């Protein structure tokens, strides 16, 4: 076996505990950085031994763990298209089964298994495999997988996932027996090994679930599924008369409705199906007949809208559709739960439990009568049915806020004399003079933990930090008085002066920490806001880097006067933006209230 292996920029960044941009900088700044020995122009590969030596020479070396070294050897042993097969062979070795690995790799895998434990070793390899093929693999985020299995009540029962990928949903099921089918043969074997290593009694078949159902006729206590979206070649012509289409033949462009009925065919009466669906499946015109039939039969029980990252980027914000196959003799239900969960998966779980137990529902959820959904379009979009804030309290709160801001607002006066030419400076010049320090959030933060993270989306939505991480080198801690801005000022996220310390800066964000006796934070925030507005007026193609923003050259006393005016105007902008959002919800709530009888005309 080759002694040296190849690594790419992502691998080097992970070994040295830096962002990928740092590796790119090293290549540009240091003439002695190792030259590529493979890969492509856009993704070069380097010799691991040469990179290790360079890191040692420059005082940056972090010991490469045996598991990391094994992963790099596995990658170097084959091409990326066959890597899944090699990973499955590693799992077989850790299970004590025969495998097609050369003797040197076989011994190394066995040593890692003894040192790390078979489960930890294989989970580590699988995690790197998923990171490498994140665009190719359909992997459900672990938190979403947990929500789906909790809602499906999978614990202790028998569970099927007919599009199991690498087994993420089945691993979260805590069931007595799991079954899965996966189109790719190597992925199916990898999933089987992974599940058995974790102690599951597992049966995983390879093949096309819709065209060649490996579990035809079998029924399970629960079915969970995250199928491929927008597949036009799902078998429409071959499966026209298939008995699974109890609720109607799925249209050619509605493969998701084929998966729904496939899952329902495999769940026992009284059992639950939880399936991820693209948001457009809720209102696409060709699927309205099947949606109506699912409602009339009392099979569809809930639709829960999630955050965009829970599904492939092309599908937008996904939904979870929850079905229950009625038991014989049961009266059909008369309503459906609708939840606009966003990133609050805990609330989504609480809403389902409350609905199932006939308890009080949390905010952002609503029970909708089935008869109200059976119109010509059968539109099941949750945002059309769920008001995310109580109309009266939201209206009053926003009215008070707007009144308060307007009363306190002191608009700039019209100058008595023509505008004077003011000297200008820029942030780069101020940074070189030591007036301001500019820091950037790390490209990737450790997952989970207790430390709050201010994300780019938090800045965009002007909300408190919602991300979480744990302590690690390279984190940027936010202090009171820091100014936070997006890497792209024209992105719509407004610069913010932080009034509290303690959170960690997320990726795609910049932090400006200044000497308050030389630079006023609200003055800086106003200047950054002006720079972003300039970018927006030129169109989104113009990148406005906040580090190049221009500022008026003023004394600190004048800066503070300007800063107060900027703060007033930025507060008005926040209020106006929030008022637009609440007014949209009030209109929808008013129309729904008039139609369902909870409101009456004036």
Image (cartoon, grey):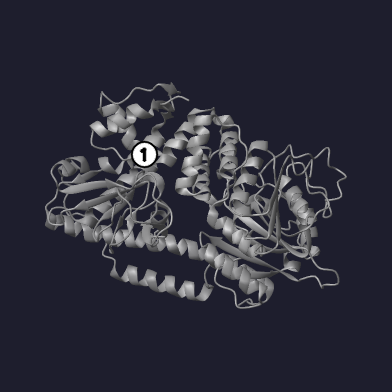
The x, y position of residue 211, in whole percent, is 79, 41
Of the pair 189 and 328, the residue shown nearer to us: 189
- Residue 44 is left or right of residue 433, and the answer is right
69 versus 408 height, above or below: above
- Residue at 22% in and 56% down: 521
Q: Is residue 57 above or below residue 565?
A: above
Q: Which residue is mark 1?
A: 64
Q: x%, y% of residue 177?
A: 69, 57
User: Residue drawn at (37%, 35%), measured in percent from left and top?
Assistant: 12
Looking at the image, how many numbered discs can be counted on the residues?
A: 1
Residue at position x 75%, y 61% in the image? 375
Residue sitting nearer the eye, 336 or 602:
336
* Left-right relation of 351 to 582: right
Q: Quadrant of residue 548?
A: top left
Quarter of the image where the C terminus is located? bottom right
Say if residue 565 shows up in the picture.
yes
Of residues 195 and 180, the one nearer the viewer is 195
**Image coordinates for residue 485, horizontal then vertical, percent:** 32, 50
- Give SS at disc 1: loop
* 44, above or below 132, in the image: above
Count residues near mark 1 (Cα–Cα under 10 Å), then give few for <14, some for 14-19, many for 20+.
Answer: some
Residue 283 seen anywhere in this rendered image of the structure: no
Horizontal relation, residue 179 to residue 525: left or right: right
Judge by depth and name the residue closer to the eye, 287 or 39: 39
Residue 406 in picture, x, y percent from top left: 33, 68
Q: Quadrant of residue 570?
A: bottom left
């Amino acid at each position: 076996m080759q002694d040296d292996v190849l690594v790419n920029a992502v691998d080097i960044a992970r070994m040295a505990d830096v962002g990928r941009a740092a590796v790119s900088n090293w290549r540009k700044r240091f003439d002695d950085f190792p030259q590529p020995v493979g890969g492509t122009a856009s993704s070069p590969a380097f010799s691991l031994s040469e990179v290790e030596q360079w890191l040692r020479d420059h005082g940056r070396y972090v010991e490469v763990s045996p598991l990391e070294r094994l992963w790099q050897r596995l990658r170097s042993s084959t091409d990326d298209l066959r890597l899944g097969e090699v990973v499955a062979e590693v799992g077989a070795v850790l299970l004590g089964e025969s495998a097609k690995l050369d003797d040197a790799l076989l011994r190394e895998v066995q040593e890692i298994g003894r040192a790390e434990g078979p489960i930890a070793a294989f989970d580590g390899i699988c995690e790197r495999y998923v990171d490498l093929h994140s665009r190719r693999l359909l992997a459900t985020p672990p938190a979403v997988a947990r929500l789906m299995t909790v809602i499906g009540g999978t614990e202790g029962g028998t569970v099927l996932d007919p599009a199991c990928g690498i087994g993420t949903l089945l691993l979260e099921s805590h069931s007595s027996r799991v079954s899965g089918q996966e189109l790719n043969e190597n992925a199916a074997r990898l999933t089987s090994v992974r599940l058995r290593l974790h102690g599951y009694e597992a049966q995983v078949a390879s093949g096309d679930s819709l065209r060649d159902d490996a579990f035809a006729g079998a029924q399970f206590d629960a079915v969970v599924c995250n199928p491929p979206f927008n597949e036009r070649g799902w078998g429409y012509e071959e499966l026209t008369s298939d008995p699974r289409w109890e609720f109607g033949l799925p249209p050619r462009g509605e493969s998701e409705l084929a998966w729904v009925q496939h899952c329902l065919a495999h769940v026992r009466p009284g059992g639950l199906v939880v399936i991820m669906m693209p948001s457009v499946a809720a209102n696409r015109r060709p699927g309205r007949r099947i949606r109506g039939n699912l409602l009339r039969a009392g099979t569809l029980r809930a639709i829960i809208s999630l955050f965009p990252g829970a599904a492939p980027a092309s599908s937008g914000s996904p939904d979870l559709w929850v079905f229950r196959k009625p038991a014989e003799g049961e009266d059909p239900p008369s309503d459906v739960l609708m939840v606009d969960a966003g990133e609050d998966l805990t609330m989504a779980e609480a809403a389902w439990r409350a609905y199932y137990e006939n308890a009080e529902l949390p905010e952002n959820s609503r029970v909708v009568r089935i008869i109200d959904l059976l119109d010509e379009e059968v539109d099941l979009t949750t945002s059309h049915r769920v008001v995310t804030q109580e109309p009266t309290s939201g209206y009053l709160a926003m009215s008070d806020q707007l009144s308060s801001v307007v009363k306190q607002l002191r608009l700039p006066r019209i100058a008595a004399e023509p505008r004077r030419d003011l000297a200008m400076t820029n942030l780069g010049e101020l940074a070189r003079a030591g007036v301001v320090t500019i820091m950037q959030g790390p490209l990737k933060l450790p997952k989970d933990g207790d430390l709050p993270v201010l994300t780019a989306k938090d800045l965009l939505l002007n909300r408190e930090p919602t991300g979480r991480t744990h302590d690690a080198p390279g984190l940027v801690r936010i202090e009171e008085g820091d100014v936070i801005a997006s890497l792209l000022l024209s992105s719509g996220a407004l610069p913010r002066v932080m009034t509290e310390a303690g959170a960690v800066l997320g990726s795609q964000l910049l932090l400006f920490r200044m000497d308050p006796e030389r630079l006023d934070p609200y003055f800086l925030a106003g200047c950054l806001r002006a720079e972003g507005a300039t970018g927006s007026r030129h169109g989104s193609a113009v990148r406005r880097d906040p580090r190049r923003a221009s500022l008026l050259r003023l004394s600190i006393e004048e800066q503070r006067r300007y800063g107060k005016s900027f703060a007033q105007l930025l507060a008005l902008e926040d209020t106006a933006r929030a008022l637009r959002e609440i007014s949209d919800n009030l209109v929808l709530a008013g129309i729904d209230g008039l139609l369902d009888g909870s409101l009456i005309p004036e």
